[in-house]
Amino acid sequence: MTSLFNPNDVRLITPELVLTISAFLILGLSVLPDLGRKTWAPVLAGLACVSTLASLLSFVWMFGLEALRTPDMTIGFNGMFILDAFSIFFKVVFLLAAMLTILVSARYLEVERAHTGEYYALILFAVVGMMFLASAGDFITIFVSLETMALSFYILVGFLKTNRKSNEAALKYFLLGSFSTGIFLYGISLVYGTTQTTVLGLIGISRAKMALQSPAAPIFVLGVILVTVGLAFKIAAVPFHMWAPDAYEGAPTPVTAFLSTGSKAAAFVVLARIFSMGFLPLGQRWATLLAILAVASMTLGNVAAILQENIKRMLAYSSIAHAGYVLMGMIAVGLGDTVETREYGLKAVLLYLLVYTFVNIGAFALVIILRREQVAGDRVADFAGLSRRAPWAAFAMLVFMLSLAGIPATAGFIGKWFLFGAVVKAHYAWLAVVAVINSAISLYYYARVVVNMYMKAPEGAARLAPSWGQRVAIGACIAFTLVFGLYPQPIIAFAERSILALAPWAS
Amino acid sequence: MVEYVPILIFLGVATLFPVATLVIARLLRPSVYNKTKLEAYECGVPPSGEARARYPVRFYIIAVLFVVFDVETIFLFPWAVKFKALGVFGFIEMLVFLGILLVGFAYAWKKGALEWV
């Protein structure tokens, strides 16, 4: 046991500290009555994200992304906190998602009459949780930061206090979420019991193999299964997806956008880190487990999405299906017979989550700008004739729908290309076939939105009035989708240099 | 498996003891019934009203605040016991923890959670 605390470690969590202090500042300022309409809150929250991003990138500038792939200098708090390239990649994704969410939130919350400083403080607290998750090298850190994130989201989902649907969504999400946390914690305790450590790096190297050969092996395997179940709840994989459609539909739409991208990506970070650092010797077994989840999520998500009339529910089921696609990358990590295949799988996961963040927030941003006084704007039918009322908004939605379906020349295609390639490389080609069939199914309900926008007469002539923040966010999402759809090299290189350094014994 | 035997014995004792005490008490005690004995116990005062009565939602905020400060004490206590061993690190860590709680408390106070409206 080394010393309890090394003051030098604090510099590793500077970005998180910046964000935490800003969140407290916003929380404190928001109770002062004389600060009026709270227009300062989104500005302050945005600045907090930008400065956090800057302090994060200063690490990259200091050490270089390549050196951070195999971190020695940047492991702190006795292995509980790892600042490697992998975690930086995801922290960037979380911060970008938070910034886009903040940009689209203000006008929406004013329409809902729920524009308060606390909302932005909670968003920032959720990001703090996610950022610690990305860096967590220990089950205890993972658990605490998972809860930090989840508790913020429980409140955010029920943020529209006078809206019954929002309340119902929050209650359902809270009950199922805390139940899944319990299962996750039980899994952790079994793994700890059989390996005598909570540090992921220590489990991975030899203790997982030792635990497998000991008479307590079934208990260890049960622990792995329970950890998988706990995380499957968080990424909303079938059959642990029940909360998702209700929570997504009832939550304020910007929160739904953030929940479906940030929270999902955060759960995948943990999944990737636990399975490729801690449980890699069990790769064959958990890959089979994940394959079942992936096939179920893709199929049920896509088929159920066809039936939805509410676009938020449709996007919820689509997001369940997308969790299934991303799981394929993890399957390649577990099954790959060479380190290259495993790293290819990880790269696909990283790339897809980055792309999905932009595309999905973009799609939800369109749902957000349809919300006006007296118009809920969350039915698929509300998109009817949008091309005549607001041609640019219709074009934006077209791009996002095509990208979600994975049509070439959009970023979504690049993401899917790598995911499907990963399972083929891992000799699981049948899974790629299932995924391609599912993509074809998904085209139906994405195209339905497009048909509504371009081929139906508008129901009213009301014009849309997006705020400049919403314009900027949608513009950024379109630019990302199209530019990196045609010229994906920069993001591929970013993902390639950020993948988790897998230990050489992996193969 | 041998190391689990004490737990098994403990389990047995823990099950037998309450059963035995109840049975013995039943055999030894005189049984005199009256109406007051069958009433719900409310700290010794005569019971008033039903247990399922509605009560103001304001109590929840008080309960949440109580839990916050209860948990604070739970963390302060072991720190106080190990104060010397933890040294300056423990002291600063505790200050940070109390600072965060204080922000929360100031927020709740300013927001009017302590007022009985």
Image: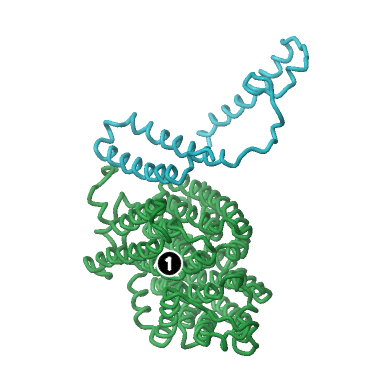
Chain colours: A green, B cyan
- How many residues crowd mark 1 within 10 Å: few (<14), some (14–19), many (20+)? many
Kind of element beneath mark 1: helix
**A372 in relation to B97, above or below:** below
Q: How many marks?
A: 1
Q: In the image, residue B100 lies at what x, y percent? A: 36, 45
Amino acid type, label 1: Ile
Camera-nearest residue between B109 and A289: B109
Q: In the image, residue A54 lies at what x, y percent? A: 28, 66
Q: In the rendered view, does A303 fall on the left or right side of A127?
A: right
At x 51%, y 86%, the residue is: A395
At x 35%, y 40%, the residue is: B98
At x 54%, y 69%, the residue is: A323
Quadrant location of the C terminus of chain A in the rendered image:
bottom left
* Residue corresponding to mark 1: A102
Residue A279 in view in this figure = no
Camera-nearest residue between A2 and A217: A2
Chain letter of mark 1 equals A
Choose top left, top right, bottom left or bottom right for residue A453. Answer: bottom right
Choose top left, top right, bottom left or bottom right for residue B71. Answer: top left
Choose top left, top right, bottom left or bottom right for residue A73. Answer: bottom left
Residue A61 in view in this figure = yes
Q: In the image, residue A496 lies at what x, y percent? A: 35, 75
Q: In the rendered view, does A174 fall on the left or right side of A202?
A: right
**A134 in relation to A411, above or below:** above
Q: In the image, residue A203 lies at what x, y percent? A: 40, 53
Quadrant location of the N terminus of chain A in the rendered image:
top left
**A203 in relation to B34, above or below:** below
